[in-house]
Image: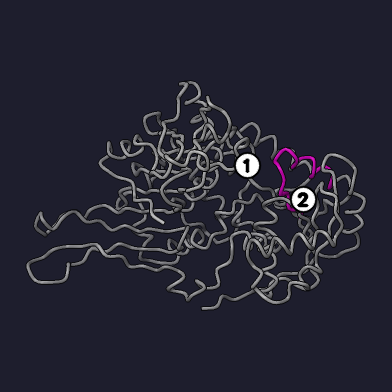
Amino acid sequence: MVSRVIPVDPFDLVIFGGTGDLARRKILPGLYRRYCAGQMPEEARIIGAARTEMDSAGYREMVSEAISEFGGKDACDNLDAFLAMLDYVAIDARGETGWAELQQMMAGKDRIEVYYFSVAPGLFGDLAERLQQWGMAGEDSRIVVEKPFGRDLASARALNATLATYFKEQQIYRIDHYLGKETVQNLMAVRFGNMLFEPLWNRQYVDHIQITVAETVGVGGRGEYYDKSGAMRDMVQNHLMQLLCLIAMEPPARFDPDAVRDEKLKVIRALDPVLPHHLVRGQYEAEEGNEEEAPSYRDAVDNPRSRTESFVALKAHISNWRWHGTPFYLRTGKRMVARSSEITVVFKDTPHSIFAEDAGRHRNVLSIRLQPNEGITLGVTIKEPGPGGMRLVDVPLDMTFAEALGPDGGDQVDAYERLIMDVIRGNQTLFMRDDEVEAAWAWTDPIIQGWEARNDVPKPYDSGSTGPTDAGEMMRRDGREWRKVSP
């Protein structure tokens, strides 16, 4: 199956932080793949902007190497034509260097203007102010800002206010790459495009829902940042919160940006406070026998007394008519047994079993895999083949995208590719609104303040495990268990 490619209008995209890791790994290779797919017009321009001193020829060479290293080099045989779209300007976000040159590059072009802030959040306000001072914050200009968007409610509000000084809300695109994943968007298609599921999507039929984002990597080179943030700020407040909203939201009246985001906001505002015994934090230990290459969390961040969590598991409740009493279990961690992101909807038992006790306990489970092997699986109970009575067994109805939609999974694109094209189109459906960000922090802040007040210490867990044993105990107290984390 080949997806339909809809070209975008001519645009100028300025990538602040254009020599950084995100630009090299994701943004620039993704843009090249979109060019090869025929989605980018020949008139498009991509301008890298960073402190590094180099000329446009040097930047094109760097981008060529990035495309070769991080994927996309075989997308087509027209790399030179793509590189010809690139320019570069050495710029100081807090000074005057480079701004006159950038202004001259952008002048006199009647086209879409996008400014991508692929920089530290502390520079967002400076860049927005400079763009206005130099006359580049026009009515049709758009800015893209990366997470973390604040570290608490107060800082998020301050940052929103700063950006709002220079740009209107409809010009601001707060990007969360999880929302660009094919399977995440399929959450809405599965729920609202199929009569089969929506009547069952409520407290009457759903026993509980699990959301797991497990990583095998440690903090790596992000130690300094991560030790000031932790899993709650780095993952739960944004990625897992967005997944929770999409799985729990009411059907919007229309599939347009504000209608969708209105319903997501209602979910966040309906979340109950998390009780202390419904929360487990953990910190990974060194990998036994491989301590040098896989050190403990505290060694990795060079802080022997760190109380920052690399793992969080919690139980949340949504106080509305649809979900009252239905628990949502969220779990994320580093150095776990496998890399896996999955949403699992566990339906209730049948009200009465007509089969003998030895037939066992069986439940329908809808599993939505975000990574790896994106796809959707529905567990159905059937009779086990063979003679000897009625023995029940669960089998999956499996739609792995790579298998169901062809070897390329239906021409799936990377999340960044999709989201950048949405910015150019002016479609904000998959981007967070200011009130949504602030509501998420308003729920998260008391959780963090609570464990700080209690002086909680994260529970140690083995690298390559499923996290602290306390997380399993939290589920067992409810008569449930976590889904197995598997690649």
Say if the magenta span includes residue 433. no
- Left or right, 406 with reference to 325: right
* Magenta-drawn segment: 115-131
- From the image, tell me which residue sits under label 2: 16
Q: Secondary structure at mark 2?
A: strand
> Could you tell me which secondary element the residue under label 1 belongs to?
loop
Picture residue at 52% right of the left edge, 39% below the top = 292
Percent of width and height locating residue 17: 75, 49
- Please provide percent x and percent y for residue 119: 72, 45
Closer to the chain start, of discs 2 and 1, is: 2
Residue at 67 percent across and 52 percent down: it is 22
* x and y, in percent, of residue 386 in the image: 12, 72
Colour option used: one colour
Which residue is painted at 48% across and 53% down in the image?
A: 246
In this view, 236 is above or below 73 = above
At label 1, which amino acid type do we have? Pro
Can residue 429 be spotted in the picture? Answer: yes
Name the amino acid type tagged 2. Phe
Look at mark 1 in the image and give the residue it sits on.
148
Neighbour tally class for label 1: few under 14, some 14-19, many 20 plus, Cα within 10 Å: some
